[in-house]
Image (cartoon, rainbow, N blue to C red):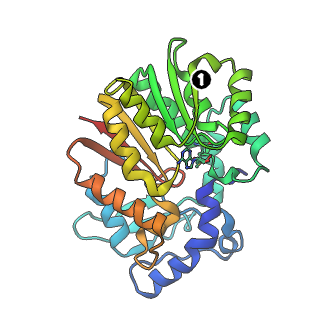
Amino acid sequence: MFMTRSLLYGSTNLIPTLHLLMASNIFSIQFQPSILRSTVKLHFSTITSISKAPRRFYGAVRASKLHQSRSCCSDAVVVVKDGKYGNKQVISLTPQIYDYMLANVREPEILRELREETASMRGSQMQVSPDQAQLLAMLVQILGAQRCIEVGVYTGYSSLAIALVLPESGQLVACERDAKSLEIAKMYYERARVSHKVDVRHALAADTLRSLIMNGEAGSYDFAFVDAEKRMYHEYFELLLQLVRAGGVIVVDNVLWHGKVADPLVNDPKTISIREFNKNIMEDSRVSISMVPIGDGMTICHKR
Ligand SMILES: C[S@@+](CC[C@H](N)C(=O)[O-])C[C@H]1O[C@@H](n2cnc3c(N)ncnc32)[C@H](O)[C@@H]1O
């Protein structure tokens, strides 16, 4: 069983929140006792029929009363009761369903090895999950990206997933402030024979992004992934918006922040920063957006 960060954080932070929301009748989801016992693997929720559902619907999921359907997997399927949208069904990821999903991820062997080697390391819950890495790699491939930036490398799981699908002439600028975790990342770039595609920048990410702009590289990148300091999301995004070309993509991780962004009682600086980021991006006509409930939530921003 993979322990993604969203699953882990769900255990400690979401239960009180869920109880609170249930008490306030904002929504009700009945968890199986067995699920509660293994709450380390409780996942917030995710949505099926993304292509069919109107974007507004996702807001309705958060705001309206949710009623659990009585089905064979009654802890999984949630029916949204809302006159405007009909009785839409969304799925709440259980450990069983998430296991199933992960069993359907094509994780390259070298990524599996990196994940397993770093699993016991401090901060390993920060790593993107295999399903997230697969989505990032696919976006890079769909874009035909040559030039990418990652903000927040850690031991290199997501950057390696990107580098593996870049063409031989491709470049990934990998921004990380922690030298120790970069050593592991570099070792795996070597092992995967992608070192020539990765330009490692050991510095504060915002400084690196500013230096790229100063170097005349604005508008020359196809893809960027943001996964570093949460209080800097606004700044990273503004800098990356300069660096990415029209038609390019910026993916921002942790936009659901273990569910805390949806809880008005949580107001620590990181939560406020991500909540503000989410609010601002909704009104930002420079990009089209899609918030995807994968991992801890990722927003895909397409620059116009
Ligand atoms: C969530 S982890 C990145 C996980 C990585 N994307 C992966 O999948 O393995 C965030 C990383 O950002 C780095 N970081 C935090 N603030 C930073 C900053 N201001 N500049 C550069 N790196 C930073 C941390 O050291 C940490 O390694």
For this view, does 185 lie left or right of residue 79? right
The quarter of the image holding the C terminus is top left
Is 114 or 153 nearer to us in this picture? 153
Provide residue 30's location: percent of width, then percent of height: 54, 77
Q: Residue at x 67, y 29 (%)?
A: 108
Res. 55 visible in picture:
no
Is 78 or 254 nearer to us in this picture? 254
Against 26, is 93 above or below? above
Asked where in the image residue 102 lies, by quadrant, the reply is: top right
Q: Determine which residue is flagged by label 1.
A: 164
* Amino acid of disc 1: Leu
For this view, does 15 lie left or right of residue 85? right
For this view, does 285 lie left or right of residue 14? left
Provide residue 83's location: percent of width, then percent of height: 24, 70
* Mark 1 Cα-neighbour bin, 10 Å: few <14, some 14–19, many ≥20: some
Against 258, is 227 above or below? above
Provide residue 223's location: percent of width, then percent of height: 41, 30
Mark 1 residue element: helix
Asked where in the image residue 278 lies, by quadrant, the reply is: bottom left
| View extreme (top): residue | 169
Provide residue 143's location: percent of width, then percent of height: 39, 25
Res. 24 visible in picture:
yes
For this view, does 166 lie left or right of residue 25? right
Is 223 or 139 nearer to us in this picture? 223
